[in-house]
Image (cartoon, grey):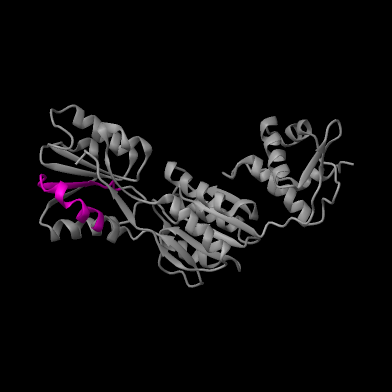
Amino acid sequence: MISDNIFRYIQIDENSVTPKYLQLTNSIIKGIEAGIIGNDYQLPSINDLSYELDISRDTAEKAYRHLKSLGIIGSVPGKGYFIAKTDFIQTYKIFLLFNKLSAHKKIIYDSLVNKLGAKAAIDFYIYNNDFSTFKKLLLEHNDGYTHYVIIPHFLEGGGTAHELINTLKGSNLILLDKKIAGITRPFGAVYENFEKDIFNALVQALPQLEKYQTIKIIFPAYTYFPDEILQGFYSFCREYAYNYVVVRHIKQEPIQAGEVYINLMEDDLVVLLDKIRETNLRVGIDVGIISYNETPLKRFILNGITTISTNFAAMGEATAQMILNNELTQTEVPFTLTLRPSI
């Protein structure tokens, strides 16, 4: 018989980025683990789930299909769905906190989820580089997880982020993408060495850079990108005697022959391409472009844009492996330079 109380144990958090079908799946598994839902327990129909939880039928159906693929539930035509297996335990409860959701961050998320499989229940949140939202989310979820996986990038106000992170209760901590100072508790990290990586990438591009006199990096004043990128950029330009400019506002920057541009933000790349199109300059001959973060489209734009990018899939896999191995290690994921005709 269906319990009138089951919907009290099924939680759909509208603020979470975790797909709703997985939230539904994890709630049912949590109910099994807590002994609230037992073997042969008859589950609500798809229509009832859709109505009571205000979710689409497709979402409810997808959740049941997922549970069925795990062998947790069964179904009988005309009678509905029931619990077929109660000895299922999700080993890992993970609080996943990203600064933003982009194509690159989605690659990390997908890689992490695929590697962990059904062993993990993941609550996924985004704080949009805003420290006050970051703080609110951590304070609201400061218990009940085996792992906290956090990307710590802020537009402003993140100077005390380490103090907040240090208060997380008794769970394993993994910093992703960037390490920050002041963490006093044990932690693992899967991170980029921003200063070293841009320096090494530009060294690899030296033969292609010889035809340019000035390197300009588009680094907005209001950005979450770390200043270590600028330090590596300065070091390269000084060591190899290049003129260099930090461009804060690309819309106001004149485009001239003999310059190569490094862009970090996708929006700035669009502006840069528009400005170049208004000139008679040829990309890869008169003016060069190097773009941060590899995407499929950059293989085709202007016959290919040169990129410097970390391996986002490898970051997700390394994080998952650290969780599966029950260890806290420091893993540096280096950049890769992909040369194309834009320089």
Q: In which image quadrant can residue 251 be found?
A: top left
Magenta stretch: includes residue 217: yes
Task: Examine the image and state in which quarter residue 146 appears.
Answer: bottom right
What is the magenta range? Answer: 200-221
Q: Would residue 283 be found to the left or right of residue 295 on screen?
A: left
Q: Left of 289 or right of it: where is 76? A: right
The front one of 88 and 55 is 88
When the figure is inspected, residue 302 is found, relative to residue 294, above or below; the finding is above
> Which image quadrant: the N terminus?
top right
| Residue 213 image offset from top left, x and y in percent | 9, 47
Q: Give the answer, above or below, for where 169 lies relative to 278.
A: below
Measured as percent of width and height from the top left, residue 14 is found at 62, 41
Outermost residue toward the right in this view: 1
Quarter containing the C terminus? top left
Q: Is residue 112 left or right of residue 177?
A: right
Q: Position of residue 194 (x, y in %)?
A: 32, 58
Q: Name which residue lies at 42% across and 64% down.
A: 331
Q: How many marks?
A: 0
Which residue is drawn at the image coordinates 41% and 54% (left, top)? 153
The reply to whether the magenta stretch includes residue 206 is yes
Residue 277: x and y in percent read: 20, 28
